[in-house]
Structure formats: structure tokens, C-alpha cells
Amino acid sequence: MANPNSESDDLFTQSEADTEAAGFALAGRLGSGAVVVLGGPLGAGKTCLVRGLAAGLGCGEPVSSPSYAIVHEYFGTGGTVYHFDFYRLETPAELEVIGLADYLESGICLIEWGEKFPEALPERHWKIELEPLADGGRRIRIQQP
């Protein structure tokens, strides 16, 4: 795994453990109130990266995909982590129903498929794109706000 604290915008991982470790290391770069949008195709490793991010933020609970629940909350030493999955949402009005604006005002928000509703995101947010590679690894492209 490449060093996530380097100047590079790209990390390369070869396993789920590597992807989780990358998330763990990246967690130290997130401040309170950070919003992170995770993109990539189904199976790219978004939830795997979130497991590492949550662990790095001191969350001891098991992390799972919120595909059907839409949001999961995890409590850690680094604050509350809100893990969203917008995959099943179809309209911006649904974001109002789940109270997205309230979540964005506190804790750290990790949003899978957040690119579906760019108008609902704060102007300054992290973008992390996961791309599966032919060799079974992942490219993780990170854009800081």
C-alpha cells in the first residue's frame, strides 16, 4: 500500500486488509465536521474503506453497508461517524426526509454514492473514488477540500 500521507492523490491496495488500512490511516486527516463522498462501482470497496475510516476514528462497532437502512451511526473517540449509502435514493427530497442537513452539521459524514446528489453536499468536501484494477487491486483517488 502507498503512503496515504504522501503528496500523491492516488493510493493502490491489493487486498481488503490493505483497503481498510488505507482508511485507518486517512482517518487521521479528517477533522470534525468532515464530509467524505465515496464513489466507485458496486463492489469497489467503499464499505471496506469506511470500516478502516471508522476504526481510525475510534469506532469499535462492526461496520456494515447501510444500503437498506440508508444511514448507520457509529460512536468513536474521534466523534460520531454517520455512514450513508445513497444508492437506493432517487430524489433530493428523500435527503430531506432522512434529515441529511442535520447530520452534516455534526460528526463526520461518510457518504457512499453521494455523487448522485451534488447539490445536497457542502461545497467543501472530500472525494474518494475507488477503482477496481485488472489485477484485483484498487486505485483509491483522494481529493481533499
Image: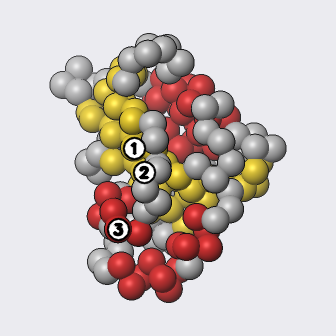
Frontmost residue, 44 versus 130: 130
Task: Name the amino acid, label 3.
Answer: Glu
Residue that appears at 75% across and 50% down:
79
Q: Secondary structure at mark 2?
A: strand
Q: Secondary structure at mark 3?
A: helix
6 to 42, vertically: above or below: above
Label 3 vs 2, first from the N-terminus: 2
In the current view of this chain or complex, which residue is farthest to the left? 134
Q: Secondary structure at mark 1?
A: strand
In the current view of this chain or complex, which residue is farthest to the front? 123
Residue 142 at what x, y percent from top left?
A: 40, 33
Find residue 29 and report its image quarter: top right
Q: CA distance from mark 2 to mark 1?
A: 5 Å
| Location of mark 2 (residue) | 37
| Location of mark 1 (residue) | 127
Q: Are marks 3 and 2 in contact (CB under 8 Å)?
A: no
For this view, does 71 lie left or right of residue 86? right
Residue that appears at 41% across and 69% down:
120
Residue 44 at what x, y percent from top left?
A: 32, 41
Q: Is residue 72 visible?
A: no
21 to 83, vertically: above or below: above
Q: CA distance from mark 3 to mark 2?
A: 13 Å
| Location of mark 3 (residue) | 119
For this view, does 16 lie left or right of residue 92? right
Task: Name the amino acid, label 1.
Answer: Lys
Q: Are marks 1 and 3 in contact (CB under 8 Å)?
A: no
Q: Is residue 106 visible?
A: yes
